[in-house]
Amino acid sequence: MSWASSGSASLNTRPVSKLPPAPAARAPDTKPSFHQIASCKPCPSNGSGAVTRSNDHLITSLEALEAHYGAAVPLSLTKELDHISDHYRAFIEAAPFVAIASSGQGGLDCSPRGDPAGFVRVTSPRTIMLPDQRGNNRLDTLKNIVGDPRVALLFLIPGVGETMRINGQAVISTDPGLCAGFIMQGKTPASVIVVTVDSVYFQCQKALARSRLWDPDARVDRATLPTAGEMAEALSAEPFDGAAYDAAYPERMKTTIY
């Protein structure tokens, strides 16, 4: 089977239209109820002059959205390709982490994937492959792909502000020869996700700069947050020893990471 396919990505934009005149402001009233907020019904002012939540301020059409934000920055369109260029390939192959988003009957999913840089392989200008390493067998991503092949991937490189994005169509292969090419620590992945690229482009540094993601001074002390064992114990209907789970995890990781 040939994983590569041809196609083109449309970079056309829709014309911008103007919004209708804004409705009159609502008079101050009591605080909104939970049911008003949850149902998105028009809510009264919170007393400070600001409307807490109102249908009058919801964007419900593409025309209104584009009118509110204006035209796209030209570079944001020209950078999008329907294939992986040499520059984009360099970013993909340098990334040790990718998040893959999918959609299916079971709902939406965004799954983190990581391995040494180069684990996502560019096998043609329109094709990438990544192993499905050992996990917890929820199979959220794979179940979604079976029902709906559309996926979106976001690549991160430690210390680098730009990210790389790919949208495409995925299939799951259990071909023994293909899986054998992704062996890690003597373990063969159960399958390989093969993605045919529809569009690929880089994202600028703003989000990572704002978040200070790679700034050592912005790192969070892990001890200030609940441990995995504490969260599991709090959520478990059956007795669960969270402290024992946390204590055993480092050694367990060594034998179950692949």
Image (spheres, helix red, strand yellow):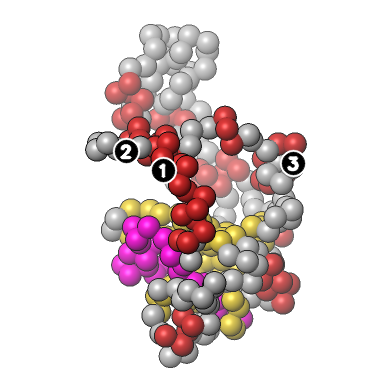
Q: Residue 240 carries which label?
A: 2
Tell me the amino acid under the disc marked 1: Tyr
Q: In which quarter of the image is residue 55?
A: top left
Cα–Cα gap, marks 2 and 3? 35 Å
Q: Is residue 233 left or right of residue 28?
A: left
What residue sits right under mark 3 in the picture? 216
Dot 3 surroundings within 10 Å: few (below 14), some, or many (20 or more)? few
Dot 1 surroundings within 10 Å: few (below 14), some, or many (20 or more)? some
Tell me the amino acid under the disc marked 2: Phe
User: Which of disc 3 and disc 1 is earlier in sequence?
Assistant: 3
Verify whether residue 137 appears in magenta.
Answer: yes
Tell me the amino acid under the disc marked 3: Pro
What residue sits right under mark 1 in the picture? 245
Q: In which quarter of the image is the N terminus?
A: bottom left
Q: Which of 243 and 199 is in front in this view?
A: 243
Residue 181, compared with residue 219, is above or below; it is below
Q: Residue at x 47, y 61 (%)?
A: 255
